Image (cartoon, grey):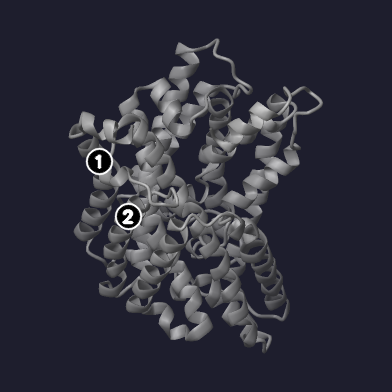
Amino acid sequence: MSAEAEDQASSPPKTAQTLKYISWVALALMTTSSVASLRPSPTMAVYGLASIFLYIVPAVVFLLPTALVSAELASGWDGGVFNWVSQGLSKPMGFLAVWCQFAMTIFYYPSLLGFVASTLAYVINPDLASSGLWTAIVIMVCYWAGVWVSSRGTSGVAGLASGGLIIGTLVPGALLVILGIAFLGQGNESAAPMTADHLLPAWAGLSSLVLIVNNFLSYSGMEMNAVHVSSLRKPGKEFPRAMFLAMGLVLLIFILPALAISWIVPAEELSLTAGVMQAFDAVFAAFDSQWLTPILGIMLVAASLGGMLTWLAGPSRGLLLISRREGYLPPFLQRLNKHGVQQNILVTQGLVTTVIALAYAFIPDVSSVYWIFSVITTQVYLIMYLLMFVAAVRLRRTQPDHPRGYRAPMLTGLCGIGFAASLAALLIGFVPSSQFGGGNVGTYLAIVAGGALGLGLLVPYLFYRFRKPSWKEAAA
């Protein structure tokens, strides 16, 4: 019996007086803490003032539909995205959805730890920020250390990231914006033009808008927060309020630091991995306070590593539970260690992550590798969102009377907008960014297509196609 079941068995029936509700403001802050981060700021800072437009558009066409649609699904069906898609479409599609939720982390960790490596370089030696070998070593060391910590079943790992919003996002972000304003106040000219003519990104074909794809990854994860919709007193009214407030706060956290970076660091000099530290180093130099740069670097690294640990066991745990119940993975990957942790999945994932990390060592441009991994991560995750939007429409039509704690307004329209935006972002990801126009287009397409389609579609298909009854029996 689980701890939750034991609590329910030993507790009196809940009444309106014993139910514990949360306010819609609290839910908005919880959502903000799980979505907002400084990591994507350099990616959008290259657009300067146009970053406002490039953040708002995906927030409206992706973040908001995702939040409202997943809230209806979470308030009506337990079991997360696997159950939603299984009920709305089929169990194989449900497996594909939960697989993509897990598989995106395979490329997410190298990109996240690439940011950690570049940030940590400013604590030791800023020249290391552009070293692919340094980045590869940091990725491998940090990942395997995280596997060791997670495989021991350390309780309270999630607490390591609970202060991440303050330590690694709010304090550095606010400081960066304040110093950026002071930098301009001293009479320094902004590195990026801040005139009305630059509110929209310059159009140079599809490649000029490719970087917007990264924002879909920045806004992802809303379906995990939707589970809290049942904790509101009046979900129908309060959940939309919470999401609009959260969206406003997330936009502020994303946009203002990106603008501050664009004021300080010229776009042609900006690193997509080390851009935050470049801006801090430059602005601290302007105020003769460069000794603060390593301190900010340690804060950012600590928050990122804490976030990695909370993500490390989560998606793989969800995949394990579904696979043990349905027999989707071979027995080797279903085994637990003595601490009850899916160590074999983590180790197998680590071997793939190690191979991916070596790409940093052999490809000269660290920013290019970081961008490619971010695109693959986004595309794999978007497959799951496409399935979720289709399943939501099907469930509204096939199970209209199923109890739901929250009903999204104009659900079909929201799903249509979210599906179209997700599909467009997925397809645009195959277009090389204008920043990397000098690279080999064929190589770029091969890496992105192989990573996104191979990992997101081919691998789960092979697991499903060659599964055996013994895989389910082994779990039993």
Q: Callout 1 environment at 10 Å: few (<14), some (14 to 19), or many (20+)? A: some
Res 128 quadrant in image: bottom left
Q: Nearer the viewer, residue 136 or 158?
A: 158
Residue 36 point in image, percent of width and height: 59, 54
Q: Is residue 281 above or below residue 97?
A: below
Q: Work out whether residue 297 can be spotted.
A: yes
Position of 126 compared to 253: left or right? left
Res 461 quadrant in image: top left
Q: CA distance from mark 1 to mark 2?
A: 15 Å
Residue 46 point in image, percent of width and height: 49, 65
Q: Is residue 290 above or below residue 265?
A: below
Number of the front mark, 1 or 2 = 1
Q: Which residue is mark 1?
A: 330
Residue 318 point in image, percent of width and height: 43, 40
Q: Amino acid at mark 2?
A: Gln
Quadrant including the C terminus: top left
Q: Which residue is mark 2?
A: 349
> Residue lying furthest right in this view?
17
Q: Nearer the viewer, residue 82 or 28?
A: 82
Residue at image x 35%, y 40%?
A: 99
Q: Amino acid at mark 1?
A: Pro
Residue at image x 57%, y 47%?
A: 56
Residue at image x 63%, y 35%?
A: 228
Position of 159 compared to 214: left or right? right
Q: Secondary structure at mark 2?
A: helix
Q: Secondary structure at mark 1?
A: loop
